[in-house]
Image (cartoon, rainbow, N blue to C red):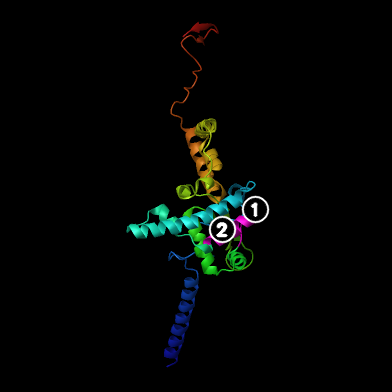
Amino acid sequence: MMALILAQAIARIGAQNSAHSGVAAAKRTMRSGGLHRTGAPVRRGSVEAGTVEDSFFAVPVKGETDRLLRAARAALDAGRRVRRTARAEGRKLDAAEAALAGLTAGAVRVFEEICTLARLNGGKVFPTYDHLAKATALGRATVARALAALEAAGFLLRQRRFCRTTGAGPRYRQTSNIYRALLPGKLLRFLPPSLRPAPLPCDAAVHRAEAAAELVAMRATLSCRELAEVTLGGALGRVLASLGAAIDRADCESHSDPQPLLESFDQTTNVVGLDGRRRPA
């Protein structure tokens, strides 16, 4: 009887432990269905904070943010016209028209706040969703949809970030995204001519083509490690640089046209005989 009770107790404890482990695993399950190694809630496509900001941010020139905001407002009106015209003609919107029609008044309001932050902070824009929601008097979900619409239209470049933590728990945590306001090239045909950028002069276009050719020629002379360091950054760049260094070492050890070894003696070398005199071979 005691053995039966002890077996039931052990089985109950095992079931509770498996349930707790299942709950813990469910908490560490990512959206893709796989288990995160550290249990950290890091979004896909995130980079470590402090690794890409120098190359991501750009200081806007005088009046650039105002022109971008005017272009966003004109794109909002153009999207309404395109949607109305397509409905009247009974046709579907193409990809550019769909991105244009996806803009809303809330998206333009969020874009205005991002342009304001870019003007005040020298292009360094990294607000949280809560800051944007408070500054625009919009809901958090509305802000998220507005950012997605701006990114789809090409007005916004967004990069997710994570940072390291100390202490118990996950080693990483998600932090605020970084943003950069842009003028979308695919929507320029819908904007008024006054908001479109002026075409490049002929000499500037030639200079840009020559610079691109020189860049390609320069990269062709780099080793695999140097090419990875120049083109990429962060953890991925360091990993590829180490792989490139291994490839460079392998190439150095096995040349396709190695230099032949120098012979110590050739046909004209004299040989020393038994009597101590040198004689030809």
Q: Helix, strand or loop at disc 1?
A: helix
Q: Nearer the viewer, residue 26 or 279?
A: 26
Q: Residue at x 46, y 78 (%)?
A: 19
- Rendered position, 36 above or below 247: below
On the rendered structure, is 119 left or right of 186? right
**Residue that numbered label 2 is attached to:** 111
Q: Position of residue 81 (x, y in %)?
A: 43, 57
State which quarter of the image contains the N terminus. bottom left
Q: Report whether residue 105 is seen.
A: yes
The amino acid beneath tag 1 is Arg
Q: Amino acid at mark 2?
A: Phe
Q: Is residue 129 left or right of residue 86?
A: right
Q: Earlier in the sequence, mark 1 or mark 2?
A: 2
Mark carried by residue 119 = 1
Label 2 crowding class (10 Å Cα cut-off): few <14, some 14-19, many 20+?
Answer: many
Span colored in magenta: 107-127
User: How many numbered tags mark residues here?
Assistant: 2
Measured Cα–Cα span from mark 1 to mark 2: 12 Å
